[in-house]
Image (tube, grey):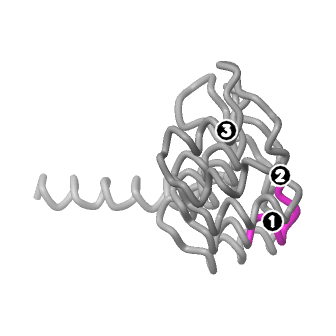
Amino acid sequence: MKKLILSFVLFLGYTTLTLAQTPTQKVYAAVVKNQPAEVAALLKAGADPNAPVEMMPGFPTSFLILAAGQSRTEIVKVLLQNKALVNKPDSFNATALMAAAGEGNAELVALLLAAGADPKLKDKDGKDALASAKESGNADVVKLLQGK
């Protein structure tokens, strides 16, 4: 009987937590799970594509930076189509372009540049997207950024 009651309480708690998620938490979960259609639906329903996300307390970032840092190209496209700010920095002044360059993702770097990403912005360590690309060791990304 105790197990049954405990199971029921846990089920109710899980259901309550799931239903109590904010739109920001739902978008975050969809970005992490690589669900572009879910991200699109949540944004269409009114979720803020530029809402600050704290993966670590006190260090906000953005959905765009998270998606770019995980090479989630389709999610980046959805976010940009829904007016995500392409140059919005995180708490370390890093941008989505720096994250994509650090991943060595040439397609994503080209996409962000076409959307107006500024390759000259620098993070708190003074590194720009080109420095991130050089660290990733991807010659194509370095080539894309060198002329910018």
Image quarter for residue 59? Answer: top right
- The x, y position of residue 49, in whole percent, is 78, 57
Mark on residue 91? none
CB within 8 Å, label 2 to label 1: no
- The x, y position of residue 35, in whole percent, is 55, 73
**Disc 2 target residue:** 117
Give left or right: position of 135 versus 131: left
Q: Earlier in the sequence, mark 2 or mark 1?
A: 1
SS for dot 2: loop
Kind of residue at disc 1: Leu
Kind of residue at disc 3: Thr
Viewer-closest of 55 and 128: 128
Give the alpha-carbon distance from disc 3 to disc 2, as whole Å.
16 Å
SS for dot 3: strand
Give the alpha-carbon distance from disc 2 to disc 1, as whole Å.
11 Å
Residue 131 part of the magenta segment: no
Q: Residue at x 67, y 33 (%)?
A: 60
Quarter of the picture containing the N terminus is bottom left
- The x, y position of residue 86, in whole percent, is 82, 52
SS for dot 1: helix
Image quarter for residue 95? Answer: top right
Q: Earlier in the sequence, mark 3 or mark 2?
A: 3
Tag in front: 3 or 2: 2
Q: Is residue 29 above or below residue 77?
A: above
Viewer-closest of 112 and 3: 112
Q: Residue at x 65, y 64 (%)?
A: 108
- The boundaries of the magenta stretch are 78-84
**Disc 1 target residue:** 80
Tag in front: 2 or 1: 2
Kind of residue at disc 2: Ala
**Disc 3 target residue:** 61
